[in-house]
Every structure is written in structure tokens, then in C-alpha cells.
Image (spheres, rainbow, N blue to C red):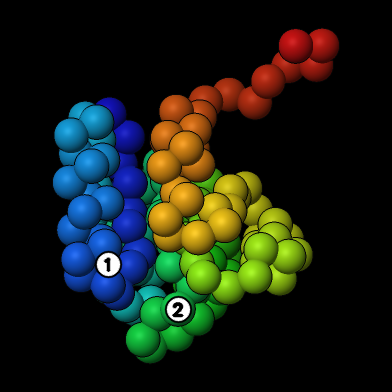
């Protein structure tokens, strides 16, 4: 079971994501604002972050920057309607992450992220 923090202000989307993750056997927590996300992540040490970039109080990148500066190294799955190039350029500089082209195309990305979060890095030659 992985601990997953869903950072999403859309209540319906967050609820659906949480239910799907719990059905898969994971512990999912939802934070609807940047402030709540930072507080929750520091308290619960999630194995994976599912992060929306468009939060009501701060940009999702702010959340990621704050968490990285405080020692949180959990992989991140960014879900956003923003352009992929811009997301990838800034996001990859902030540590391990996966992007999904849109909220509707997240299924395979989050499943792969959940499977690999916390897994040891592959060794050379594999």
C-alpha cells in the first residue's frame, strides 16, 4: 500500500481519484490548496504526489518547490491542462516526476507512478 497525496481543488475530480486509488489498495489523502498540500505532505510523508498546477491560493510549482526545499523527495505526477513543454521544463528541474497530457489522460501515468514510487532505481545494464 502506497501513501498518495492528491493535490487538487476540484472536489469531484479529487474524490474520484481518491476512490480509484483506494480501490487499488492505496491510502489516498486530498488537499485542495497549496497551504494544505504542504502541511499534509510534511506531516504524512507520501510515497507519491498527484499535483494539479492550478490551485486557488498558489501555483502547484510553488508547492513542489516548497516540498523539495523541505526534504520531500516523493515522485510527482502532474495533472494539468497547461502545455506539456512548459510543465516538463520547469517540473523536471524540481525532481522525479511524470506528466500527463491532460486530466483525462492520467490513467496509465498514475498507475505506472504508483507501481514505481519507492522502488529502487534500476541498476546499470538492466
Q: Which residue appears at 50% of the width and 60% of the height?
A: 102
Quarter occupied by the N terminus: top left
Classify residue 101 by image quadrant: bottom right
- The residue tagged 2 is 54
Which residue in the rendered view is the most extreme toward the top? 125
Q: Residues within 10 Å of mark 2 (few under 14, many from 20)?
A: many
- The residue tagged 1 is 31
Taking 85 as reference, is 116 left or right? left
Residue 111 shows in this picture? yes
Mark 2 or 1 closer to N-term? Answer: 1
SS for dot 1: strand
Classify 34 as above or below 124.
below
Classify 124 as above or below 39.
above
Residue 79 in percent (x, y) is at: 47, 60
Q: Which residue appears at 58% of the width and 48% of the height?
A: 98
Q: Nearer the viewer, residue 72 or 14?
A: 14
Q: Residues within 10 Å of mark 1 (few under 14, many from 20)?
A: many
SS for dot 2: loop
Residue 52 in percent (x, y) is at: 43, 67
Q: Which residue appears at 18% of the width and 58% of the height?
A: 15
Residue 76 in percent (x, y) is at: 51, 52
Quarter occupied by the C terminus: top right
Contact, CB < 8 Å: mark 2 with mark 1?
no
Residue 117 shows in this picture? no
Amino acid at each position: 500500500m502506497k501513501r498518495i497525496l492528491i493535490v487538487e481543488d476540484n472536489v469531484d475530480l479529487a474524490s474520484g481519484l481518491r476512490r480509484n486509488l483506494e480501490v487499488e489498495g492505496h491510502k489516498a489523502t486530498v488537499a485542495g490548496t497549496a497551504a494544505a498540500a504542504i502541511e499534509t505532505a510534511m506531516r504524512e510523508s507520501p510515497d507519491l504526489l498527484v499535483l494539479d498546477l492550478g490551485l486557488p491560493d498558489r501555483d502547484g510549482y510553488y508547492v513542489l518547490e516548497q516540498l523539495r526545499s523541505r526534504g520531500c523527495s516523493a515522485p510527482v505526477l502532474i495533472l494539468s491542462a497547461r502545455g506539456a513543454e512548459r510543465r516538463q521544463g520547469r517540473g523536471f528541474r524540481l525532481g522525479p516526476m511524470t506528466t500527463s497530457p491532460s486530466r483525462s489522460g492520467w490513467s496509465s501515468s498514475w498507475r505506472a507512478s504508483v507501481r514505481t514510487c519507492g522502488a529502487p532505481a534500476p541498476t546499470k545494464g538492466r
